[in-house]
Amino acid sequence: MAKHREFQKHKLWAFHAAKSVHPDMENWKDGRLQWSVTFYPKTAHAIDKDNAVSSLKAYQDGLAMAMFVNDNLFDIPTIHFGQPVKGGKIVVVLG
Protein backbone atom coordinates (compact mmCIF):
# COMPACT_ATOMS: atom_id res chain seq x y z
CA MET A 1 0.00 0.00 0.00
CA ALA A 2 2.81 2.45 0.84
CA LYS A 3 4.52 1.68 -2.48
CA HIS A 4 1.29 2.48 -4.33
CA ARG A 5 0.93 5.82 -2.51
CA GLU A 6 4.53 6.73 -3.35
CA PHE A 7 3.98 5.81 -7.00
CA GLN A 8 0.83 7.97 -7.15
CA LYS A 9 2.65 10.88 -5.51
CA HIS A 10 5.36 10.83 -8.19
CA LYS A 11 2.85 10.32 -10.99
CA LEU A 12 0.89 13.40 -9.87
CA TRP A 13 4.10 15.38 -9.46
CA ALA A 14 5.02 14.61 -13.09
CA PHE A 15 1.51 15.53 -14.23
CA HIS A 16 1.58 18.92 -12.50
CA ALA A 17 5.17 19.64 -13.54
CA ALA A 18 4.31 18.93 -17.18
CA LYS A 19 1.16 21.07 -17.05
CA SER A 20 3.05 23.97 -15.45
CA VAL A 21 5.58 23.97 -18.31
CA HIS A 22 3.17 23.18 -21.17
CA PRO A 23 -0.50 23.77 -20.23
CA ASP A 24 -1.69 22.65 -23.68
CA MET A 25 0.11 19.29 -23.76
CA GLU A 26 -3.14 17.45 -24.50
CA ASN A 27 -2.86 18.57 -28.12
CA TRP A 28 -0.21 15.91 -28.85
CA LYS A 29 -1.04 14.33 -32.19
CA ASP A 30 2.38 13.29 -33.49
CA GLY A 31 2.34 9.55 -32.80
CA ARG A 32 5.28 7.96 -30.97
CA LEU A 33 6.92 9.94 -28.18
CA GLN A 34 10.68 9.99 -28.07
CA TRP A 35 12.21 11.25 -24.89
CA SER A 36 15.56 11.51 -23.23
CA VAL A 37 16.35 11.64 -19.55
CA THR A 38 19.54 12.84 -17.87
CA PHE A 39 20.19 11.62 -14.35
CA TYR A 40 22.34 13.74 -12.07
CA PRO A 41 22.85 11.41 -9.08
CA LYS A 42 23.11 12.50 -5.44
CA THR A 43 26.43 10.69 -5.06
CA ALA A 44 29.12 9.25 -7.30
CA HIS A 45 27.45 5.82 -6.88
CA ALA A 46 25.80 5.49 -10.29
CA ILE A 47 22.80 3.36 -11.20
CA ASP A 48 22.73 1.29 -14.37
CA LYS A 49 20.54 2.06 -17.38
CA ASP A 50 18.05 -0.74 -16.69
CA ASN A 51 17.32 0.58 -13.22
CA ALA A 52 17.19 4.13 -14.53
CA VAL A 53 14.52 3.22 -17.10
CA SER A 54 12.43 1.28 -14.58
CA SER A 55 12.57 4.17 -12.11
CA LEU A 56 10.78 6.39 -14.64
CA LYS A 57 7.46 4.50 -14.80
CA ALA A 58 5.52 6.85 -12.50
CA TYR A 59 6.84 9.90 -14.37
CA GLN A 60 5.95 8.35 -17.73
CA ASP A 61 2.43 7.71 -16.46
CA GLY A 62 2.12 11.28 -15.20
CA LEU A 63 3.34 12.73 -18.50
CA ALA A 64 0.93 10.51 -20.44
CA MET A 65 -1.91 11.63 -18.19
CA ALA A 66 -0.99 15.30 -18.79
CA MET A 67 -0.93 14.72 -22.54
CA PHE A 68 -4.14 12.65 -22.65
CA VAL A 69 -2.31 9.80 -24.41
CA ASN A 70 -1.76 6.15 -23.64
CA ASP A 71 1.66 5.58 -22.09
CA ASN A 72 2.38 2.88 -24.68
CA LEU A 73 3.15 5.71 -27.14
CA PHE A 74 6.37 6.41 -25.24
CA ASP A 75 9.50 4.88 -26.74
CA ILE A 76 12.15 3.61 -24.35
CA PRO A 77 13.93 6.78 -23.22
CA THR A 78 17.48 7.62 -24.13
CA ILE A 79 19.37 7.66 -20.83
CA HIS A 80 22.27 9.96 -20.00
CA PHE A 81 24.19 10.38 -16.76
CA GLY A 82 25.55 13.71 -15.58
CA GLN A 83 27.88 14.61 -12.76
CA PRO A 84 26.61 14.23 -9.17
CA VAL A 85 24.50 17.14 -7.90
CA LYS A 86 23.59 17.80 -4.28
CA GLY A 87 20.14 16.28 -3.74
CA GLY A 88 20.16 14.68 -7.21
CA LYS A 89 18.25 15.85 -10.26
CA ILE A 90 16.53 14.39 -13.33
CA VAL A 91 15.99 16.34 -16.55
CA VAL A 92 13.36 15.06 -19.01
CA VAL A 93 13.23 16.24 -22.62
CA LEU A 94 10.32 15.23 -24.85
CA GLY A 95 10.63 15.15 -28.60
Image (spheres, rainbow, N blue to C red):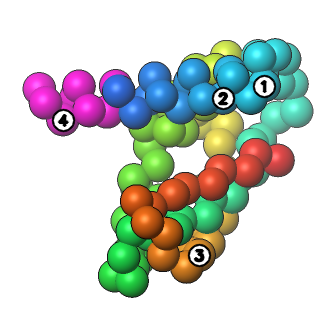
Q: Which residue is mark 4?
A: 3
Is-magenta flag for residue 71? no
Of the numbered discs 3 and 2, the one sitting upstream in the chain is: 2
Residue 70 in view of the camera: no
Residue at 55% of width from left, 79% of height from top?
83
Q: Are marks 1 and 2 in contact (CB under 8 Å)?
A: yes
With 37 as the anchor, is 8 left or right in this view?
A: left
Up-down: is 17 above or below 66?
Answer: below
Residue 40, horizontal then vertical, whole percent: 52, 68
Q: Which residue is mark 3?
A: 82
- SS of the residue at dot 2? helix
**Does the magenta portion include 2?**
yes
x then y, percent, for residue 19? 68, 21
The crowd level at tag 1 (other Cα within 10 Å; few <14, some 14-19, many 20+) is few
Q: Amino acid at mark 3?
A: Gly
Q: Quadrant of residue 15?
A: top right
